[in-house]
Image (tube, grey):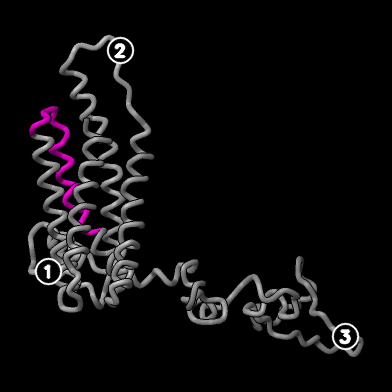
Amino acid sequence: MSGGYSSLPTSHLLGSVPAAVDADHKALQFEEANLEIFPPSNTQGGTWGYHSPNDIDGGEGSEQAQGGWKGFFSIASYRPYFNIDTYDVVERTMATLYAQRGDFLEKIQHNPDLYGPAWISTTLVFMVTALGNYASYLSYGQGKHTKDWYYDINYVSWAAFVIYGYICLVPLGYYFLLKYLSIPTSFVQLCCLCGYSLFIFIPSSLLLIFPTEFLRWTVIILAGIASSWFLAFNLRSYIMTMSDKWATVVASAFAIQLCLALTIKFCFFV
C-alpha cells in the first residue's frame, strides 16, 4: 500500500475497460475529433449541421445584403434602416409637431429610417381601432337605443388597409412624380417623411373619442392641416431649388393629407 493508488492493477478492477490494442498489443491511435466538420464534408447537397462561430458571423453561411431586385426579398437589405437610436426617433417625431424651416429631409438624407414610420403606422392602426370603438360606445350611451352595442372588429382591417396603404402607396406616388420632374430622390426618404407625418394623428385620436361633433371636426381639421403643412413644407423646401414645378407637389401633399384626415373621421369617429 506504500505505492499509493497508482500501483493498483487497474485492469482487474470492477468496471474497468482495457485499452483497445491491435494484434501486436500496441495501443490504437485515434484521430482527434473535429466537431466543426460534422457532418462529414462529403455530404451531397452542400454543408449542413454544425457551423463554427466564424461561419455564422462572416463565413459562407452568413446572410448578406443582395443587390438588384433580389435585395427586395432579403432581410439584410432592410437592416440598416432599422439601426437607429431612440434619441433620433424622438427628435424626428417631435419635429413633426412644428415647422422646422423644411429641413426634415435634409436631416434624414444620410440616415433615413423605417423604424419610426413602422412604429407610428402600427400604433395608429391600433389607436384608431380601439378609440374608434370607444367613441362609438360613448355616442351610443348618449341616446336611447333598442339594440345592444357591439364592438366592431372590422375596424382593425379597415385601419390596416387605410394606414398601411397610405404608407406604401403615397411615397411610391411621390417617388414616380419626382422622377418624372427629373428630381433626384430616395424612396426610403419619402417613406420616412410620410411615415413621420402621421404622428400628429396619434394624440389627436385621443381627443376624437368625445361625442361632440364640433370638437371632433375641429381636432381632425387641425390635425390634417398640421400634417399637410409638415409634409408639403418639407417637399417644397427640397424641390423648389431643383424645379419650378413645386406647386403641383405641394398641392397634392395638402390634398392627400386632408383626404386621409377625413377618411379617419368618417370611417372611425362618426
Identify the element where label 3 is drawn.
loop
| Residue under the point 69% across and 84% down | 32
Looking at the rendering, the stretch of residues picked out in magenta corresponds to 195-214
| Residue under the point 13% across and 31% down | 210
- In the picture of the structure, the residue carrying the numbered disc 3 is 22
Up-down relation of residue 26 to residue 175 (above or below): below
- Can residue 134 be seen here? The reply is yes
- As drawn, the label of residue 147 is 2
Q: Earlier in the sequence, mark 3 or mark 2?
A: 3
Up-down relation of residue 201 to residue 109 (above or below): above
**Separation of residues labelled 1 and 3 (CA atoms):** 85 Å
**Separation of residues labelled 2 and 1 (CA atoms):** 51 Å
Up-down relation of residue 107 to residue 98 (above or below): below
| Residue under the point 80% across and 87% down | 27
Judge whether residue 174 is colored magenta: no
Q: Amino acid at mark 3?
A: Asp
Closer to us: 52 or 223: 223
Q: Which of the two discs, 3 and 2, sits closer to the camera?
A: 2
- In the picture of the structure, the residue carrying the numbered disc 1 is 102
Q: Earlier in the sequence, mark 1 or mark 3?
A: 3
Q: Quadrant of residue 86?
A: bottom left
- Can residue 82 be seen here? The reply is no
Q: Which of the two discs, 1 and 3, sits closer to the camera?
A: 1
User: Which quadrant holds the N terminus?
Assistant: bottom right
Image location of residue 175, percent across then percent down: 32, 67
User: Which quadrant holds the C terminus?
Assistant: top left
Q: Quadrant of residue 196?
A: bottom left
Identify the element where label 2 is drawn.
loop
**Separation of residues labelled 3 and 2 (CA atoms):** 92 Å
For mark 3, does the 10 Å Cα neighbourhood hold few (<14), some (14 to 19), or many (20 or more) residues?
Answer: few
Closer to us: 249 or 87: 249
